[in-house]
C-alpha cells in the first residue's frame, strides 16, 4: 500500500493534545505511523487544518424509515438531483439524500464514520442493504430496544441478566452496534393511542414505567460492557416544559459506573438534547431550558450528549417516536407516515419547515446552539442535527459557523423577524463563547470516538491509529470571519483520507474507499430462558419465521466485528 | 420588447427538457448565445441550437423579452417553466411541466398540453388554447404546495386531478374535467364551464369551485346551504351553494368555521 506524508499542516488532535501546532503526519498501510520512507507521496498542508476524520454519533441515514421518507417525498429531490463530473453517481435529495449522496457528502465534510441511530431489528436487513450501498464512510446501526416486548417483560421484573442475554442475541441477529432507546414505553403506549410523557407514566398492559426501562437498559448495557453506552431519545420530546423530564431521566444514571474495556466513561448518551430542553407551558410562553439541562450534564461525568441543532431548513422528521410524529402532523397538517413494527417498535415521518420567521423555530435554533456553548467538557458534547430531524447533516458547516463565530450567530439572531421574542425567550444573545478548532475536534472527532468505544483506532492522529484524516482549507492563524467562508471551508475538504487512501481531493470524490460495517458481537452465558422466550414469541406473534430473522452474512460483506466477552463464571 | 423566434428543426429521440426556454434564461442574449444554452435529453446534455433554428434577440431583461416557438413541440418539456416576466407563445402542443412554477409574465400555448402543466403556478397568466392533461395546476408529485397565484385558462377539456392542493390564484376551464377536481384545495378559485365526472373538492379545506355543467357523482361531504346570484367570469347566473368537504379539518376565522365552497349553476 502507498505511503503519504502530510506536511506542514496545523494539526488539531485532542488525543495527543495537539492544538494547531505544525506537525507532519505520516501514513502507511492504512495506519498513522511515526515515519515513512523518502518515496512517500507528499501532501502539502501548509496553511491548512489537519484533523482526524469526523464521527457522526447520531443520524438517520439508512433503513426502512429513511427510505419511506425518500419514496413519499419525491418533491425533496425534484430540484436537487444532479450528476457532478467524475466518478460519482447522480446525487439526489436534500433532507433525505440517496445512499450515494449520503456517502459523498459526509466524505466531503470530512466524516469517515456515521452511526445510523435507529434500526428496527425486524427490518435490519434493509438497514444493512443501505449501509452497504453507502460509499466511503464506515457505518454502524443501533437497534431499538425501548419498546420491545421482551425488554418490557424482563425489566418489569428487573431481570437484567435476561435483558442482557436478549440484547446480545439481537446484536448478533441484526449485526447491531449497541442499545438505542426511543421514547421508552411511549411508542408501545402509542399502540393503545396513548403516550408516556413523564418517566413515571405506566406503559399500558406491561405495567412498567419509562424510568424502569431506562435504568434497566443502562444496567444491561454495563453488564455486557458494550463499546457504546445506552443511547437515549427521551420521553416528551419537543414539548414546552419537558426539561424537567429530561433532567429526571438523566438522574437515573447517577451512581452507575461504566464497565468496559474500550475506554468509554459514560453510561448514558442523551441524544438531540435541544428537543428536550424547553421551559414554559405552551408555545406562547416557551423558553429555553438549555442552561438548566446543561448545568446538570456538566456536573455528571458519566453522561454524554449530542445537540440536535435546528438548521432552519425544510426537512423531513422521522423517528421511532410514533406518537410524536402524529402530534407533529396535527400541528402542520402535512403528510404523515406511520408504521408499527410488530413486537419491537414503530416509526413516523412528517415533512417539516423550520421557518425562521416563526419565533418558536428560531428559538429552537437558539436552544441547540446554547447546548453546545454551555458544554464545559467538549469531550462529552457532540454536534449533530439529528439528521434529518432538526436539519440535514449537510448543514454542519453552517452550524459550525454559528458556534465558532459570535458575529455569525448574532447576525442570524438579530435578523429574525421576531428577534426580540427569540432574544427574550433564550440566553443565546448573552453567550460570547466561540468554539475553537481544538474544541471542534473534540466535539466531532475524539469525543464521539470515545463515546462509541472506538477511541483505540479512531478520532485521533496518534501513530497506530487508523489513517482517517480530514484536511481543511483553513489557516487557523487567519481564521475566516465571514459565515460564508467558514461554511465553504468545512463543506469541501482539501483532502479526505479513509483507511490511508485519498477519497476526496479538493472537494471532489476521487475514490469510493473500502467502507466497513461495524457491529458488536457480545458473548454471554447460554440462557435457556431467553432462547425459550424467543422461540415462543416467534411462534405466537412474529409474522416471520425465526430462521428468516437474522441478517445474512451476504448483507454485510465488509464487517468490522468488535468482540465483547460478557460470560460470567 | 424584443422577440426571439425558435423553430423546431430536429425532433429529439426521447424528450427534450427545455428548462432554458423562457424569457429569464434568454434575457440579455443574442441568437448565438441562446443557441448555446443547454438542454437535457435523458442523461445527455445538448444545446438548444441542436434542435431549434433561432432568430432575433432577447431584450435586456425577461420583461423585455418575447419568445415565439414554432414547429412540433409534442416532445418538449418545461417550456416557459419558472418564467417570472415577459411573454411566450408556443404554436404547438407540448409536453409535461409547460408553464410550471411560473411566477409572472404571459404564456400562451396554441395547442394541447400534456399532464403536469402549470404545476404550482405562483403568478402570471398561462393560457392553453387547446386541451390539458391530468394534474393541471396541481402540486408536484408528493408536494402539498399547488397553484398559489396567477391565472390559468384552458379553452378545452382537462383531465383528472386538476388543481390538486390549490392554495391561491384562479383557474378557468372551458370544457369538462375527469375525476378529482380541486382535491385538498386550501384556497383559490376554480371555474369549470363544462361537466365534472366525480369527486369534486374531495378533502377541500378552503377555496371556491364554480361548476356551470353537471357533476356526475357528488361527494357525500357537501351540504347545500342556499342559493345565490353571482357573476362568474362575466356570466350572471343563479347558483346553489354547498359547503364542504365536511370530512376534512376546517380552520376558524373570527369564531366562524371556514369551509370550502362549491357553487353549482342552476
Image (cartoon, coloured by chain):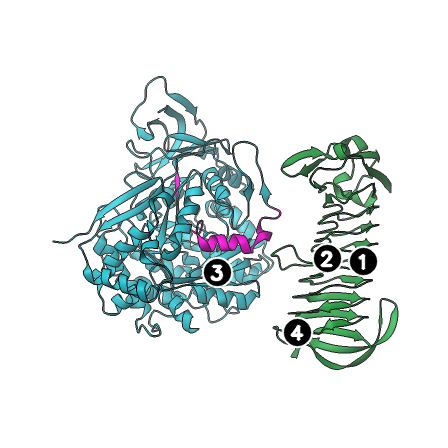
Chain colours: A cyan, B green
Q: Residue at the far top: name it.
A: A38
Dot 4 or dot 2, earlier in sequence: 2
Indicate yes or no whether the magenta region holds residue A502. no
Query: Can you give x and y, in whole percent of width and height, for residue A560 in the image?
Result: 31, 41
Near mark 2 (Cα within 10 A), the count class, few <14, some 14-19 or many ≥20, is many
Q: Is residue A515 visible?
A: yes
Which residue occupies the foreground of this view, A381 or A163?
A163
Q: Name the residue located 74 percent from the left edge and 71 percent from the top edge.
A: B216
Mark 2 lies on residue: B136
Indicate yes or no whether the magenta region holds residue A59. yes
Query: Can you give x and y, in whole percent of width and height, for residue A128 in the image?
Result: 39, 47
Instruction: Kindly report which numbered mark, 3 or 1, lies closer to the viewer in this rendering.
Output: 1
Cα distance between the residues tagged 2 and 3: 46 Å
Query: Can you give x and y, in whole percent of width and height, for residue B160 in the image?
Result: 70, 61
Same subunit: marks 4 and 1 = yes
Q: Secondary structure at mark 3?
A: loop
Which stretch is magenta?
Answer: A53-79
Q: Secondary structure at mark 1?
A: strand
The answer to whether the residue labelled 2 contacts the one labelled 1, judged by CB atoms less than 8 Å apart, is yes
Say which quarter of the image contains residue A528.
Answer: bottom left
Which residue occupies the foreground of this view, B157 or A548?
A548
Cα distance between the residues tagged 4 and 2: 21 Å
Mark 3 lies on residue: A426
Instruction: Kindly report which numbered mark, 4 or 3, lies closer to the viewer in this rendering.
Output: 4
Mark 4 lies on residue: B245
Near mark 3 (Cα within 10 A), the count class, few <14, some 14-19 or many ≥20, is many
Near mark 4 (Cα within 10 A), the count class, few <14, some 14-19 or many ≥20, is many
Question: Mark 2, chain letter?
Answer: B
Q: Is residue A252 visible?
A: no
Q: Secondary structure at mark 4?
A: loop
Mark 1 lies on residue: B154
Amino acid at each position: 500500500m502507498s505511503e503519504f506524508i502530510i506536511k506542514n499542516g496545523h494539526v488539531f488532535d485532542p488525543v495527543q493534545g495537539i492544538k494547531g501546532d505544525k506537525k507532519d503526519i505520516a501514513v502507511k498501510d492504512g495506519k498513522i505511523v511515526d515515519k515513512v520512507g523518502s518515496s512517500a507521496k507528499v501532501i502539502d498542508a501548509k496553511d491548512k487544518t489537519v484533523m482526524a476524520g469526523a464521527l457522526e454519533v447520531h443520524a438517520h441515514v439508512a433503513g426502512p424509515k429513511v427510505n419511506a421518507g425518500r419514496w413519499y417525498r419525491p418533491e425533496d429531490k425534484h430540484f436537487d438531483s444532479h450528476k457532478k463530473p467524475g466518478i460519482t453517481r447522480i446525487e439526489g435529495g436534500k433532507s433525505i439524500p440517496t445512499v450515494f449522496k449520503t456517502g459523498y457528502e459526509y466524505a466531503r465534510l470530512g466524516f469517515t464514520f456515521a452511526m445510523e441511530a435507529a434500526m428496527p431489528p425486524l427490518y435490519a436487513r434493509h438497514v444493512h442493504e443501505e449501509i452497504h450501498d453507502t460509499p466511503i464512510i464506515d457505518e454502524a446501526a443501533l437497534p431499538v430496544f425501548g419498546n420491545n416486548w421482551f425488554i418490557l417483560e424482563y425489566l418489569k421484573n428487573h431481570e437484567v441478566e435476561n435483558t442482557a442475554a436478549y440484547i446480545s442475541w439481537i446484536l448478533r441477529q441484526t449485526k447491531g452496534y449497541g442499545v438505542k432507546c426511543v421514547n421508552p414505553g411511549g411508542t408501545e403506549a402509542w399502540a393503545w393511542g396513548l403516550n408516556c410523557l413523564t418517566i413515571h407514566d405506566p406503559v399500558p398492559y406491561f405495567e412498567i414505567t419509562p424510568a424502569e426501562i431506562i435504568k434497566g437498559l443502562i444496567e444491561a448495557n454495563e453488564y455486557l460492557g458494550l463499546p457504546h453506552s445506552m443511547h437515549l431519545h427521551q420521553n416528551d420530546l419537543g414539548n414546552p416544559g419537558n426539561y424537567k423530564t429530561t433532567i429526571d431521566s438523566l438522574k437515573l444514571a447517577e451512581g452507575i459506573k461504566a464497565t468496559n474495556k474500550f475506554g468509554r466513561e459514560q453510561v448514558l448518551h442523551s441524544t438531540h438534547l435541544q428537543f428536550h430542553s424547553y421551559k414554559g407551558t405552551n408555545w406562547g410562553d416557551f423558553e429555553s431550558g438549555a442552561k438548566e439541562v446543561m448545568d446538570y450534564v456538566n456536573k455528571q461525568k458519566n453522561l454524554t450528549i449530542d445537540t440536535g441543532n435546528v438548521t432552519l431548513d425544510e426537512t423531513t422528521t422521522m423517528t421511532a417516536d410514533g406518537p410524536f410524529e402524529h402530534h407533529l402532523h396535527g400541528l402542520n397538517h402535512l403528510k404523515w407516515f406511520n408504521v408499527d413494527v410488530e413486537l419491537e417498535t414503530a416509526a413516523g415521518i412528517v415533512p417539516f419547515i423550520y421557518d425562521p420567521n416563526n419565533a418558536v423555530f428560531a428559538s429552537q435554533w437558539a436552544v441547540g446552539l446554547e447546548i453546545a456553548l454551555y458544554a464545559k467538557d467538549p469531550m462529552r458534547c457532540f454536534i449533530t442535527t439529528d439528521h434529518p430531524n432538526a436539519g440535514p447533516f449537510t448543514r454542519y458547516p453552517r452550524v459550525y459557523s454559528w458556534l465558532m463565530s459570535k458575529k455569525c450567530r448574532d447576525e442570524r439572531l438579530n435578523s429574525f423577524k421576531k428577534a426580540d421574542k427569540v432574544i427574550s425567550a433564550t440566553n443565546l444573545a448573552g453567550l460570547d463563547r466561540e468554539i475553537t478548532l481544538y474544541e471542534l475536534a473534540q466535539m466531532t472527532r475524539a469525543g464521539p470516538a470515545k463515546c462509541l468505544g472506538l477511541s483505540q483506532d479512531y478520532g485521533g492522529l496518534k501513530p497506530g491509529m487508523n489513517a482517517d484524516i480530514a484536511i481543511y482549507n483553513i489557516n487557523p492563524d487567519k481564521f475566516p470571519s465571514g459565515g460564508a467562508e467558514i461554511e465553504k471551508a468545512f463543506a469541501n475538504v482539501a483532502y479526505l483520507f479513509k483507511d490511508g487512501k485519498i477519497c476526496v481531493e479538493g472537494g471532489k470524490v476521487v475514490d469510493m474507499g473500502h467502507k466497513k460495517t461495524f457491529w458488536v458481537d457480545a458473548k454471554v452465558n447460554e440462557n435457556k430462558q431467553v432462547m425459550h422466550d424467543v422461540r415462543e414469541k416467534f411462534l405466537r406473534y412474529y409474522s416471520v419465521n425465526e430462521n428468516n430473522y437474522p441478517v445474512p452474512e451476504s448483507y454485510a460483506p465488509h464487517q468490522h466485528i468488535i468482540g465483547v466477552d460478557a460470560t460470567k463464571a | 420588447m424584443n422577440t426571439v423566434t425558435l423553430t423546431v428543426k430536429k425532433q429529439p429521440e426521447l424528450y427534450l427538457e427545455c428548462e432554458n426556454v423562457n424569457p429569464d434564461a434568454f434575457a440579455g442574449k443574442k441568437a448565438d448565445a441562446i443557441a448555446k444554452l443547454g438542454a437535457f435529453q435523458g442523461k445527455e446534455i445538448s444545446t438548444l441550437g441542436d434542435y431549434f433554428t433561432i432568430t432575433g434577440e432577447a431584450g435586456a431583461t425577461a420583461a423585455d423579452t418575447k419568445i415565439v416557438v414554432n414547429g412540433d413541440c409534442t416532445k418538449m418539456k418545461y417550456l416557459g417553466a419558472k418564467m417570472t416576466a415577459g411573454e411566450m407563445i408556443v404554436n404547438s402542443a407540448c409536453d409535461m411541466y409547460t408553464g410550471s412554477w411560473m411566477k409572472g409574465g404571459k404564456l400562451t400555448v396554441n395547442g394541447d398540453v400534456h399532464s403536469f402543466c402549470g404545476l404550482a403556478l405562483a403568478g402570471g397568466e398561462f393560457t392553453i388554447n387547446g386541451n390539458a392533461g391530468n394534474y393541471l395546476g396541481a402540486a408536484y408529485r408528493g408536494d402539498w404546495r399547488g397553484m398559489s397565484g396567477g391565472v390559468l385558462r384552458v379553452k378545452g377539456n382537462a383531465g383528472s386531478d386538476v388543481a390538486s392542493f390549490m392554495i391561491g390564484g384562479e383557474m378557468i376551464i372551458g370544457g369538462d374535467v375527469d375525476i378529482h377536481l380541486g382535491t385538498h384545495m386550501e384556497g383559490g378559485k376554480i371555474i369549470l364551464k363544462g361537466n365534472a365526472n366525480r369527486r369534486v373538492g374531495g378533502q377541500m379545506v378552503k377555496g371556491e369551485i364554480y361548476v356551470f355543467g353537471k357533476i356526475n357523482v357528488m361527494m357525500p361531504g357537501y351540504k347545500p346551504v342556499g342559493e345565490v346570484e353571482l357573476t362568474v367570469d362575466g356570466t350572471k347566473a343563479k347558483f346553489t351553494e354547498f359547503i364542504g368537504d365536511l370530512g376534512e379539518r376546517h380552520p376558524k376565522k373570527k369564531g366562524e368555521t371556514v369551509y370550502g365552497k362549491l357553487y353549482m349553476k342552476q
